[in-house]
Amino acid sequence: MSAVESQESNVLILSAVIGGAILFFIFYFLKAAKSEEDESQKQNAEAEKSRQGSRNGAAVKNKNDEGKQTSKKSKPPVRTDQKAAAFTHPWLSTSLKGHSSTVLSMDFSSNGKYLASCGDDRSVFLWPSKDFTSKEHKSLRINIEFDHATYIQWSPDSKAFIIHKAVENCLEVYKLNKKSDGHGFSGATKLTTFPKQHVEDVVGMGISCNGKFIMTCSKLTDLVLWDLKGQIITTVDTYLMNNNCARVSPCGRYVAASGFAPDVKVWEVVYNKSGDFQAVNRAFELQGHKSGVLDFAFNCDSTKMATVSKDGTWKVFNTKIEYQKGEDPHLIQTGKHDYASQEGNRIAISPDGQLVVCSSGSSISFYSVETGKCEGFIQDVHTSPITCVLFDSSGEHLLTAGDRHIRVFHNVVGFQIKLLSLKTSLKGSNQSSAMKERIQQQISQTETFLKKFEN
Ligand SMILES: *[C@@H]1O[C@H](CO)[C@@H](O)[C@H](O)[C@H]1NC(C)=O
Ligand SMILES: *[C@@H]1O[C@H](CO)[C@@H](O)[C@H](O)[C@H]1NC(C)=O
């Protein structure tokens, strides 16, 4: 090749590279501009709603009441939902304020110290759970650039979190940075972005408590298991026509999915003695609903599962079974679910498995698993359909999300149920006097707590 030719080809390559780079940047800016535009359209719409609200004489909330915005990039929140700010209820312990639009997902760290939440305001918030009973809340805001998280889960060691990003439709892992004094976190660093795998929106994401796998599941029928580095371990076809929801059991042994077909399918993820992945085996199914299961939940030790269906019922199953010997889950209780709204149908079961909370639209109902009866109802907890209901690990609090505020309720119905069962166990047995004394003590503590909510 002559020097001239070589120069010419260099120029050619150079212009190709520059051209490519320009195209890339144009594409990139268009994409960024598009999401900015969507954002501002949404905010304009909200601002308009807000103006209408003010005209109707609703009180406008003081700016100083808002959660602190620590980021420079974040836009000031548009104060639209005065109704959200005005919500009160005797059982409400507090509202966590910081997100500037809808909270989509929440998860407690396994050590119970933090709640993580994510929303379509492109942020993740960490909230120390010890503040739930006080009026003041510290929080740490972490920005998700050019995208927002639809699901969030803590890593089992409580040192990192995983999000599912809406636009890119992939997972991302963030490591939390400890403050220099060792107390709390100062921020988070992006560690890994998983390759995009799902064609459709993800409807479930979870991580096993042993840290062996991460599960994602899309609206179609594909469920994927990943290792923590972002390599696919295996994929499963759920054969549910369409998936509505998918979860990893708290014991880390099962993955489960529900969808258009009325059964919840549960698989066991099998590892051999040296810790190598072997297979995903069909374990058991929760049967009996007449229509698709909209949401389901495990209790804390995976011995019970609760389901809520389009057929207008909820069910609780005993899943402490030997499915290898052909044993099926036992139905413990079923009851009516007010399927008033197409949206906001979520379910949570208390850690002890005694209480089920179902949401419909923006309201929540409390059902006793023993009797099946509705023992509590709270209307319009949020200004839009509920996205997430969650018990804390003690079962003393119930958290809900549905607008930009997170509601933290005292689990009053849970305490009432506990009181009844304590009284039963005191009456109906020949326990030692030391044991009886302990139960009596618990009864009076519970009664004292419940007195605060009587009126
Ligand atoms: C576990 O599985 C891996 C890969 O399938 C294999 O190499 C290993 O020998 C197995 N270990 C045991 C204890 O069976
Ligand atoms: C109660 O006492 C009887 C006889 O003293 C004993 O056989 C039984 O196992 C006890 N029941 C419980 C629940 O401890």
Image (spheres, rainbow, N blue to C red):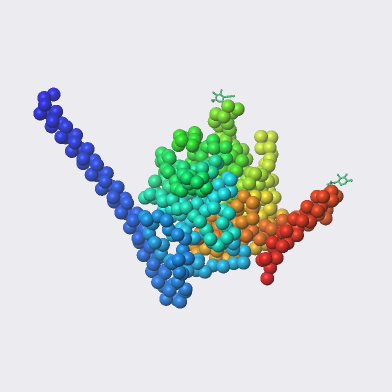
**For residue 208, which quarter of the picture?**
top right
Instruction: Count the labels in the image.
Output: 0
Give left or right: position of 331 versus 250: right
Q: Residue at 62% across / 64% down in the picture?
A: 91
Give left or right: position of 162 versus 337: left
Residue 44 position within the rendered picture, expressed as x and y whole percent measured from the top left: 36, 65
Instruction: From the viewer's side, name the closer residue of 17 and 449.
Output: 449
Does residue 220 appear in the picture of this structure? no
Residue 22 position within the rendered picture, expressed as x and y whole percent measured from the top left: 23, 44
Residue positioned most to the front: 181
Residue 381 position within the rendered picture, expressed as x and y whole percent measured from the top left: 55, 64
Q: Is residue 238 above or below residue 336?
A: above
Instruction: From the viewer's side, name the closer residue of 220 and 225.
Output: 225
Q: Residue at 63% across / 48% down in the picture?
A: 299
Residue 48 position within the rendered picture, expressed as x and y whole percent measured from the top left: 38, 69
- Which image quarter is the N terminus in? top left
Q: Is residue 8 above or below residue 426?
A: above
Give left or right: position of 36 versus 343: left
Instruction: From the viewer's side, name the closer residue of 449 and 172.
Output: 449
**For residue 16, which quarter of the picture?**
top left
Q: Residue at 67% across / 50% down in the picture?
A: 353
- Which image quarter is the C terminus in? bottom right
Give left or right: position of 74 versus 157: left
Q: Residue at 44% across / 46% down in the picture?
A: 188
Q: Is residue 144 above or below residue 417?
A: above
Q: Is residue 201 above or below residue 365?
A: above
Does residue 146 appear in the picture of this structure? yes
